[in-house]
Image (cartoon, rainbow, N blue to C red):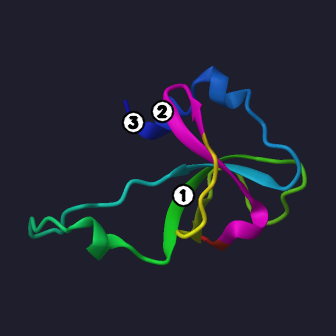
């Protein structure tokens, strides 16, 4: 089952962030190049991390459900386990870019 399919679980759909907060799921990073070279963790560290938006709060203006957003890697947010998958609730101000 794909990660996106697991997020369609009813317990996740009932979770709605309040205010200007966003529920996100971190996009897994590739640990291997096309040529098969395995990259160590410190080589993959960048200043930003991609996340998939699962739900948005009522006061969120720029981000929509289903968007891919980039957040600062240094920021740590409280993890929330929904349907056996770790999600994070972040403030809208933590979003660096939307793709």
For residue 27, which numbered disc appears in the image? Answer: none
Rate crowding at label 2 as few (under 14), some (14 to 19) or many (20 or more) other CA atoms within 10 Å.
Answer: few
Mark pair 3, 2: CA separation: 5 Å
Q: Is residue 87 magenta?
A: yes
Image height of 35 relative to 24, above or below: below
Rate crowding at label 3 as few (under 14), some (14 to 19) or many (20 or more) other CA atoms within 10 Å.
Answer: few
Q: Which residue is mark 1?
A: 51
The mark lying in front, picked from 2 and 1, is 1
**Image coordinates for residue 89, horizontal then vertical, percent:** 69, 48
Badge 2 or badge 1: first in the primary sequence: 2
Q: Is residue 82 magenta?
A: yes
Q: Are marks 3 and 2 in contact (CB under 8 Å)?
A: yes
Residue shown at 54% from the left, 57% from the top: 51
Q: Which residue is mark 2?
A: 5
Residue shown at 57% from the left, 24% from the top: 9
Mark 1 falls on what kind of element?
strand
Residue furthest left as drawn = 36
**Image coordinates for residue 87, horizontal then vertical, percent:** 57, 42
Image height of 59 relative to 82, above or below: below
Relative to 66, is 50 on the left or the right? left
Q: Which residue is mark 3?
A: 2
Q: Quadrant of the N terminus?
A: top left
Residue shown at 74% from the left, 27% from the top: 14
Q: Which residues are magenta?
A: 80-95
């Amino acid at each position: 089952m794909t990660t996106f399919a697991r997020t369609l679980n009813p317990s996740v759909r009932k979770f709605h962030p309040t205010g200007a907060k966003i529920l996100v799921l971190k996009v897994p990073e590739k640990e291997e190049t096309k040529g098969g070279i395995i990259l160590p963790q410190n080589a993959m560290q960048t200043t930003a991390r991609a996340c998939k938006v699962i739900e948005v709060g009522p006061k969120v203006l720029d981000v929509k459900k289903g968007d891919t957003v980039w957040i600062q890697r240094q920021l740590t947010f409280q993890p929330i386990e929904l349907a056996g998958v770790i999600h994070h609730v972040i403030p809208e101000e933590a979003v660096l870019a939307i793709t």
